[in-house]
């Protein structure tokens, strides 16, 4: 099974961070996907919550929801495993990739430092000269 995360990028309902779907890769459900999961920022600000697919309906004007994915037994272990897997997938989706190790510090001799400075100064001088020549040439053609 794979989990596909689609971030909301701040659009839509406040607090909703992403939509999620389960993509089945093995067994009798292979090639199918289960949509309707959502990752929400907790109101307390610490962590995330996951809502499961549900269908809403109305009874006597009162809005209710019918859970489409339910535990088979008395425990909620399966539901909690899916919830945690979706949160883990979301965190992996939004966390930046690890950065490469910093480059080692190089020690440059004073002679090399002086040569680098001369090259930089020469380059700066050439750029300034080219700029003034171009400006001077452009001013000759003004009408």
Image (cartoon, grey):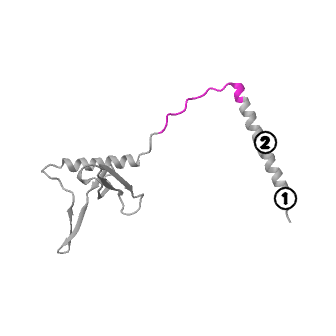
- Residue 111 magenta-highlighted: yes
Coordinates of residue 87 in the picture (x, y in percent): 31, 49
Viewer-closest of 29 and 116: 29
Which quadrant of the structure image shows residue 124?
Answer: top right
User: What span is colored magenta in the figure?
Assistant: 99-113
Q: Which residue is mark 1?
A: 139
Q: Which is nearer the N-term, disc 1 or disc 2? A: 2
Per the image, label 2 sits on a secondary structure element best described as helix
Magenta stretch, overall SS: loop
Which quadrant of the structure image shows residue 16?
Answer: bottom left
Q: Is residue 50 left or right of residue 120?
A: left
Which quadrant of the structure image shows residue 107?
Answer: top right
Seen at 79% across and 50% down, the residue is: 131
Q: Which residue is mark 2?
A: 125
State how far apart marks 1 and 2 are (Cα). 21 Å
- Residue 123 magenta-highlighted: no
Q: Is residue 131 visible?
A: yes
How many residues crowd around disc 2 within 10 Å: few (fewer than 14), some, or many (20 or more)? few
């Amino acid at each position: 099974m794979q989990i596909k995360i689609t971030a909301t990028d701040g659009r839509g309902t406040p607090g909703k961070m992403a939509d999620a779907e389960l993509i089945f890769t093995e067994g009798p459900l292979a090639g199918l996907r289960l949509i309707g999961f959502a990752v929400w920022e907790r109101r307390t600000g610490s962590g995330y919550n996951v809502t499961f697919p549900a269908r809403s309906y109305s009874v006597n004007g009162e809005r209710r929801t019918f859970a489409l994915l339910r535990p088979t037994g008395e425990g909620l272990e399966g539901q909690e495993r899916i919830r945690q897997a979706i949160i883990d997938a979301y965190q992996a989706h939004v966390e930046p990739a690890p950065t490469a190790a910093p480059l080692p510090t190089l020690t440059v001799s004073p002679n090399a430092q002086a040569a680098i400075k001369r090259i930089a100064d020469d380059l700066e001088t050439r750029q300034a000269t080219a700029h003034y020549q171009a400006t001077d040439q452009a001013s000759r053609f003004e009408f």
